[in-house]
Amino acid sequence: MNKNRIKQFGVCLLGLFLTACGAGGQQDEFTLLPIEQQAQTVSAEETLAAEDKAVFVYICGEVVSPGVYEVPAGSRIWDVLLLAGGFTEDAAQDAINLAEKAEDGMQITVPSPAQEEARRAARERQEAGLFNLNTASKEQLCTIPGIGETRAEAILRYREEKGGFASVEEIMQVDGIKEGLYAKIQDKIYVE
């Protein structure tokens, strides 16, 4: 058999199968299209499916019912919040942009006013060039005058071994950092 006959045979078998399935109680009618039109139909269906695609969003924090919610593509954070039962009494409601579009895999954390204030303060400190010794990366530490790659690695090692810094002054326990260097960098670092 040549390739055209094999394709025609396959199309006929498919048509018979679909007809048999339709006779078993299905009320939908099937129309067998030539192979060229089938390919066009599939791509049109794929386009429609992409537009109607649902997204999954995780919302947590100060909401009544935290969890993962499925919403249609193009939905807003407001829609997800409504599904989660709305804000709790302890929510910092202005911390979330309710008009933002929901994206698949997105996590929305609704903070309390205290959490939002702490986040805002940390952002302001970082913008001012201050770094938390317990969370700063090696690259961030290297931006502090007097802290090069070797000292930054020593700080990270100390932090890992000791479980973090309890105070800013504790940095003088790190190899290579004594009172003179501490005096120069103390206004660039903090501990939380």
Image (spheres, rainbow, N blue to C red):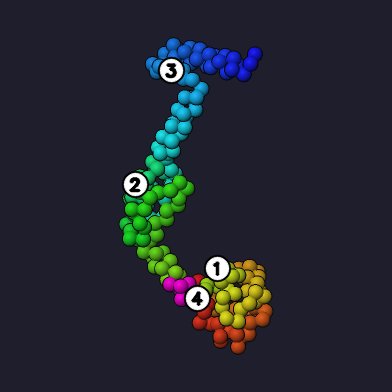
- Residue highlighted by disc 2: 79
Q: Residue 163's spot in the image, x, y percent?
A: 60, 68
Q: Is residue 160 left or right of residue 114?
A: right
* Residue ID at (36%, 58%): 96
- Residue highlighted by disc 1: 135
Which numbered mark, 3 or 1, is in the foreground of this view? 3
Residue flagged by tag 1: what amino acid is it?
Thr
Q: Secondary structure at mark 3?
A: loop
**Mark 2 or mark 3, which has the lower sequence index?**
3
Residue extent of the magenta highlight: 124-129
Q: Secondary structure at mark 4?
A: loop
- Residue highlighted by disc 4: 130
Q: Is residue 127 magenta?
A: yes
Which numbered mark, 4 or 3, is in the foreground of this view? 3
* Residue ID at (65%, 74%): 149
Q: Secondary structure at mark 1?
A: loop
Res 178 visible: yes
Residue flagged by tag 4: what amino acid is it?
Leu
Q: Residues within 10 Å of mark 4 (few under 14, many from 20)?
A: many
Secondary structure mostly taken by the magenta-highlighted segment of the chain: helix
